[in-house]
Image (cartoon, helix red, strand yellow):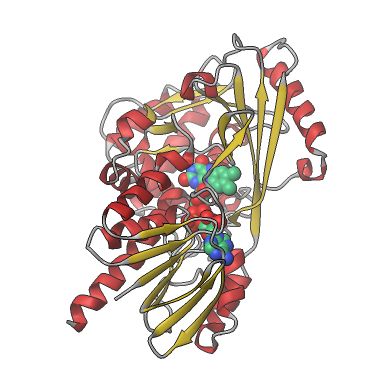
Amino acid sequence: MQVAVIGGGYAGMAAAVTLAGQHVPVTVFEAANTLGGRARRVEHRELALDNGLHILIGAYRETLRLMQLVGSDPRLQLLRIPFTWIIHERFSLKAARLPAPLNLLYGLLAARGISFGERLSAARFLLHMRHQDYALPQDVSVTQLLDEERQSAGVSRLLWRPLCVSALNTRPGAASAQVFLNVLRDSLDADLAASDLLLPRVDLTRLFPEPAAAYVEAHGGAVLTGQRVTAIDQSPDGYTVRFTAGEDTFSHVVCALPPQHVGAFLFGISALAEVAEAIDRLAYQPIYSVYLCYPQEVRLPAPMLGFDSALLQWAFDRGTLCGQKGVIGLVISAEGEHQELAQDELARLAHQELQQQLGLLPSPLWHRVIAEKRATYACTPALRRPEPQTPLRNFFLAGDYTASGYPATLEAAVRSGIGAARMILNSVSRDS
Ligand SMILES: Cc1cc2nc3c(=O)[nH]c(=O)nc-3n(C[C@H](O)[C@H](O)[C@H](O)COP(=O)(O)OP(=O)(O)OC[C@H]3O[C@@H](n4cnc5c(N)ncnc54)[C@H](O)[C@@H]3O)c2cc1C
């Protein structure tokens, strides 16, 4: 058996680690020179930035497990903060160190920035969802659910809406209420640590994909970067994979490409035409990251701060997190008018908004804007996502867009990779 894993993002590397750990010969093909895909290091002025500022949570069980397995200690590489939701000068909620759901209920009742009536209604909403096991008879939009549950404009704007956009990268009016509830269930209503926020202290390539590659190689596998796959053809022995430096034949394929690139390979294979069409129907949402570098003494009042402002949603203090003093990373999730702006103009407006929020700041020494136009698929109600197991024998899909209860996140990607690898391991043990 020889397995080709195509794509060296979090899904592909999770699949490769799982297979290599069971002594299965595996080769990863990654088109870019840097592993990580949509969660990767971007070098800028000798600093290791990321293509996008990421938040992990304690519920990312499989990501944390694999990080540990490949020698990237989550306790050192991530800053763990008990669930705290701070919208600068508008709202703050801190989960209490109590078992769920008391942690959040207590936090909600003690939250600052909304009236007591709004706090009560938010707590009632959570209890109601809990009572029905966070399952809806029929998926609707998050806005519709919040309206049905009589959530006020204030609590929606300061809590539910930013939670929805952060987790689903889709605005509440278009976002799946069921997936939103799945996230609430598994993060805020699980064990105490599940709701913790985990902020990377190293770049996203170093966090997992690089140590994962070292692990795969130490277990006899190969990780080929700068090797773009150009075709996957069925052959008598399995699959012939054509890539930058040549071609090779494999018994199994884990296709861990981003969804917008998968179709090009699948449309040529008649058994996969339906899968390709389902992937083709996905719509996408952007995420913009704006890095502003100020003089070293500029700091945020917290490592991560939310804003109730026109443009910016989150700010990260890269000095506190990863020693990049004076560098503030800003996040603008989901679609909006900012997409029409030139990058210099966007950086100028981001600096202006930051000043409105924090007070006078010196001019940035430099800025860098990274626009991920297809950051994630749009997580809309009742969306049908492709299954990892395809009608084609020994050909599996992995990636954050494959069927699961989760939105497009690192954990969804990692779980899908592990899932595809386990299907291969199970099929081998069945056949032997
Ligand atoms: C800006 C941004 C912010 C985000 N924030 C968060 C967050 O805070 N928390 C969170 O959990 N998630 C976040 N996400 C989502 C998360 O990054 C993704 O869900 C996850 O990285 C997807 O991993 P993947 O392996 O499924 O796909 P990808 O990362 O897209 O991996 C696919 C890989 O395939 C490679 N590839 C493409 N074509 C070829 C080819 N022909 N041959 C070989 N290789 C090829 C690509 O280079 C890439 O490395 C964010 C995403 C973005 C873009």
Of 379 and 246, the residue lying toward us: 246
Of 426 and 71, the residue lying toward us: 71
242 to 60, vertically: above or below: below
Question: In the rendered image, which quarter contains the C terminus?
Answer: bottom left
| Residue 43 location (% of width, % of height) | 59, 36
Res 46 → quadrant: top right
| Residue 337 location (% of width, % of height) | 79, 43
9 to 266, vertically: above or below: above
Q: Residue sitting at 60 percent across and 66 percent down?
A: 261
Q: How many marks?
A: 0
Question: In the rendered image, which quarter contains the N terminus?
Answer: bottom left
Q: Residue sitting at 40 percent across and 49 percent down?
A: 129
Res 124 → quadrant: top left
Question: Outermost residue toward the front?
Answer: 245
Q: Residue sitting at 26 percent across and 77 percent down?
A: 427
157 to 378, vertically: above or below: above
Of 284 and 325, the residue lying toward us: 325
277 horizontally vs 95: left or right? right
133 to 324, vertically: above or below: below
| Residue 58 location (% of width, % of height) | 35, 38
| Residue 221 location (% of width, % of height) | 33, 60
Res 162 → quadrant: top right
The answer to whether residue 258 is visible is no
The answer to whether residue 376 is visible is yes
